[in-house]
Amino acid sequence: MFEQVLAAKKRLNSHANKTPVLTSQTLNTLLGAEVFFKCENFQKIGAFKFRGAFNCISQLSAQEKKRGIIAFSSGNHAQAVALVGNMLGIKTTIVMPNNAPKIKLAATKGYGAKVVIYNTETEIREEVTAAIQQQHGYSLIAPFDNKHVIAGQGTAALELFEKITDLDMLLVPCGGGGLLSGSAISAKSINPNCQVIGIEPEQADDATQSFYSGKLHSIPNPKTIADGTRTTSLGHLTFPLIQKYVDAMKTVSEQAIIEAVKFHMLRMKIVVEPSGALGLAALLSHSVKAQGKIGVIISGGNIDPATLVQILENKI
Amino acid sequence: MFEQVLAAKKRLNSHANKTPVLTSQTLNTLLGAEVFFKCENFQKIGAFKFRGAFNCISQLSAQEKKRGIIAFSSGNHAQAVALVGNMLGIKTTIVMPNNAPKIKLAATKGYGAKVVIYNTETEIREEVTAAIQQQHGYSLIAPFDNKHVIAGQGTAALELFEKITDLDMLLVPCGGGGLLSGSAISAKSINPNCQVIGIEPEQADDATQSFYSGKLHSIPNPKTIADGTRTTSLGHLTFPLIQKYVDAMKTVSEQAIIEAVKFHMLRMKIVVEPSGALGLAALLSHSVKAQGKIGVIISGGNIDPATLVQILENKI
């Protein structure tokens, strides 16, 4: 699989942002360790999802590209597919729920995608999507359970290891597992001694349960502020990859996530969405014991102003 | 003077953060130009002030270091001097007003400095400072009107030019003029064709008035959200340097500053204090016409959570 990450890196070369790696002296002193943050909040569309979407969509055949692409998502994947479709001149349809935040709806439309709204109470998004897909022959771009998407997501950790090779530990947020499995493939291929740990909210610990039980576990509608981890379960591709390449899964409380978002903002001066702050949350709450050189993937920075205000005012 | 900036760079080499240069595709598309942000909000203590303070204090004689240092400031300079004093094992006293924000008071004490509070209604800070200075033989570390401080501040622009040499324009916030004069020295020495433009709030346009009239102009207690530019006037060293090396001065409205802070936060995912957002404010409000390759120095990111909330809720 690592060859596919290396190939993805070449494909992304002049298209994705080479996001910076930031450190915080205050944090290092506090933890007695060295932490290196790979800042995918500075990636195109504000999240790592651009990497997987570009790597996947750019490999479609000329005919598939001509027919068009479709995705269902209310979050960062929607914006990533919409932007890549726009960049490559591909007709793009995004299926979004009628309760999607207006800001994300506007952003997706802003990239030139056609948005189809479905009613969450009377329709099932997979059925709505399948009907449109069949009618037009569109290619479905899956948010995480696709080998090209996984390989694309693995390029963020690859870039981090190119800067800091001797990481003792790598912390990665886990939703559907695309970022975690891709990162773990890169980590174990470059430095097999690096411990790869997936981080989930306590309230959305389906992957942790799956990892330790060996059986794919689902949690419908998990209640967590970390909206990027509200996927109900790992995928059929990501689950075995995580079993193979990941060393441990850890969980963090909602309060720990909020504290981490605040630390990122007020101490490190970067805006990080709750899902993106899971790694720091694990360190600050001692869910993961800090030691040596620690890499942390910040998955994204797309947070609503209203949520930011609630966090700053301690109202959550 | 440029030799002094180069010497400062060597001194700062293993002490200051090499802050990243960030870009925004959204902004570039909006402006039809290429903008490169030098992010001093990621500098130690969250602002460029660390550079000048370190370059100045590290050059004191052994005896001066033994006696101790003193500074008066309610802002980033106080924290910078306190941190450098701590790093170099020098006894440090900071004179702060009784109305200084608690968060800055705590930060300054946190770096191990002794804080002396003066009453803004009954005492004059220069007199309070001079009395302590004379009693103990402390060296006064001036916030901007000191050649070593100016040379240190010039290293941020130097690092930017090392990455992007062919900038057509460089936008720099202006308070007391330390950052602006230092940046202009670097810019004109590396690329004389680069237009250097200082940016001030309309409400604190003393440097703009001085620049265009040729006479040092003062504004007591300027009312602007950009607290880093509330200095009453340029200094006796910075004013002639700005006359010599700077091409133009431009001003921006309070509303433009607020919009720029929001754009930095919600689009670029970085936390920037109002003074640090002056460059982007000038571009977004067309006070400076965007063209070609534009460098922007973001001076710092130290903003109170309460002010952030007010900006996000459009209450200012």
Image (cartoon, coloured by chain):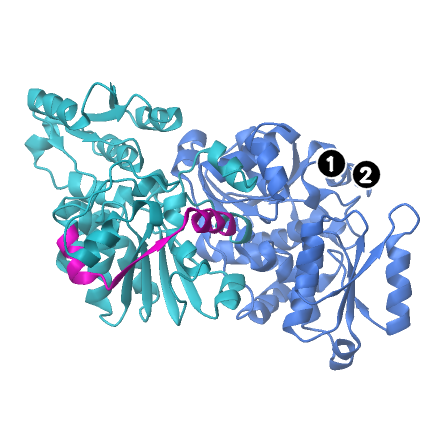
Chain colours: A cyan, B blue
Q: Residue at x 52, y 64 (%)?
A: A25
Question: Where residue B86 sits: x, y (%)?
Answer: 66, 70
Q: Which residue is mark 1?
A: B205
- The one nearer the camera, A176 or B167, is A176
- The residue type indicated by label 2 comes to Ile
Question: Where residue B119 sits: x, y (%)?
Answer: 87, 50
Task: Reply yes or no: does residue B255 show up in magenta.
Answer: no
Residue B219: assigned label: 2
Chain part drawn in magenta: A239-263
User: Considering the numbered disc 1 on the image, is that residue within a helix, a strand or a loop?
Assistant: loop
**Disc 2 residue crowd, few under 14, some 14–19, many 20+, Cα 10 Å:** some
- The residue type indicated by label 1 comes to Asp
Q: Residue at x 57, y 60 (%)?
A: B44
Q: CA distance from mark 2 to mark 1?
A: 8 Å
Task: Reply yes or no: does residue A245 show up in magenta.
Answer: yes
Q: Is residue A5 above or below residue B228?
A: below
Question: Where residue A5 sits: x, y (%)?
Answer: 18, 55
**Which quadrant would the N terminus of chain B be assigned to in this image?**
bottom right
The answer to whether the residues at label 2 and label 1 have Cβ atoms under 8 Å apart is: yes
The reply, left or right, for residue A316 in relation to residue A134 is right
Task: For mark 1, name the chain.
Answer: B
Task: For mark 2, name the chain.
Answer: B
